[in-house]
Amino acid sequence: MSKYIWLLDPGHGGVINGAYQTRGKRSPPFADGSILYEGVFNRDIASRIKALCDVEGIECENVVNSEHDVPLATRVLRANTRHTADRRCRFISIHANGWGDGATFNLAHGTSVFHYMTSRVGKEMATALLKHIVQETGLKSRGVQANMSWANFYVLHKTVMPAILSENGFMGKRSPLFADGSILYEGVFNRDIASRIKVLCDTEGIECENIVNSEHDVPLATRVLRANTRHAADRRCRFVSIHANGWGDGKTFNSAHGASLFHYMTSKTGKQMATALLKHIVLETGLKSRGVQANMSWANFYVLHKTVMPAILSENGFMTNLEDATNLMKDDFRQKVALAHFNFIKEMESS
């Protein structure tokens, strides 16, 4: 009997067209056209770890025992049930990271390990694993991390045993391929909408600033710092983060569609702003309303809880739905999305 039972969680993916994948979790294309799917990587690493443990007689189990995508809650339930039967369990969720527009490779690199912020054993595990990853692979260390916001992963705060999550390097958000081979890149869409909104505001003499003033990827923390600095200088600031949504395997279009608005859950002004903007998006674009949402777990976005002014985040249709994505590629539809945001801004200005 080994000291611990190691539960391995290779997230992101069931078999789709021969590759384990989910929710656009993949790299940009390499020069030869190949793509790294995170689900493939995660499952391969978990299988290799189990094989090594088996050789040494170390008890090690994979909580994903199917070729199908196993939901997050199911994986956690399996781990917790196993831990209830035997309290020696330790949980490791295995991943590859990603940053940027998903279309091109960028400078973000290295490895991180996460733990639940109040778990002393989790912190010890994370520190030890990061040391070994850096030593064996040469990947740059991005540190051991834990907080209740952007690093508060479901598998860390819902498991009842010591748990860690490893991000083993970076991959590269975009749509599946259209029939003609084209791709919708979220970064391109987001910047285009922001530029259109600014033009509309400039025409009306409404003060509007873009906190991304470079063609390069601007880190999340930098964007939030810029917004907070601007708000410190002028307390009239309001923050709008613009996005297109995604769901599924990242390779095939699916049925998830529509527009959502998010706000920080304790912000009354944020809720009012989100409700107003969603109304205008549905009115201008015809996108299905998926509602206004706020919570402290999966919808607790960094830009919402780290900004010090009223802030909202708009998800303007799904890149992974063929109808939504087709519209998001069209100039006239993008103008409608921008106009919806502009009409919302005018409503806020007049209220």
Image: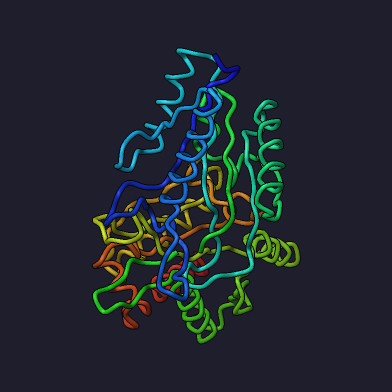
Q: Position of residue 84 (x, y in %)?
A: 47, 14
Q: Position of residue 143 (x, y in %)?
A: 71, 47
Q: Position of residue 85 (x, y in %)?
A: 45, 12
Viewer-proximal residue among 202 and 56: 56
Residue reaching furthest front?
55
> Residue at point 36% right, 50% down?
20
Viewer-proximal residue among 165 and 134: 134
Q: Splitting the image into 4 quarters, where does residue 311 fall?
A: bottom right
> Residue at point 39% right, 60% down?
245
Q: Is residue 346 visible?
A: no
Viewer-proximal residue among 36 and 101: 36
Q: Splitting the image into 4 quarters, where does residue 133 fall?
A: top right
Image coloring type:
rainbow
Tell me: residue 343, above or below residue 90: below
> Residue at point 31% right, 37% down?
66
Q: Position of residue 111 (x, y in %)?
A: 64, 51
Decide if residue 238 is on the left or right side of residue 131: left
Q: Is residue 196 visible?
A: yes
Decide if residue 263 is on the left or right side of residue 333: right
> In the picture, which quadrant includes the N terminus?
top right
> Residue at point 30% right, 49% down?
15
Count of labels in the image: 0
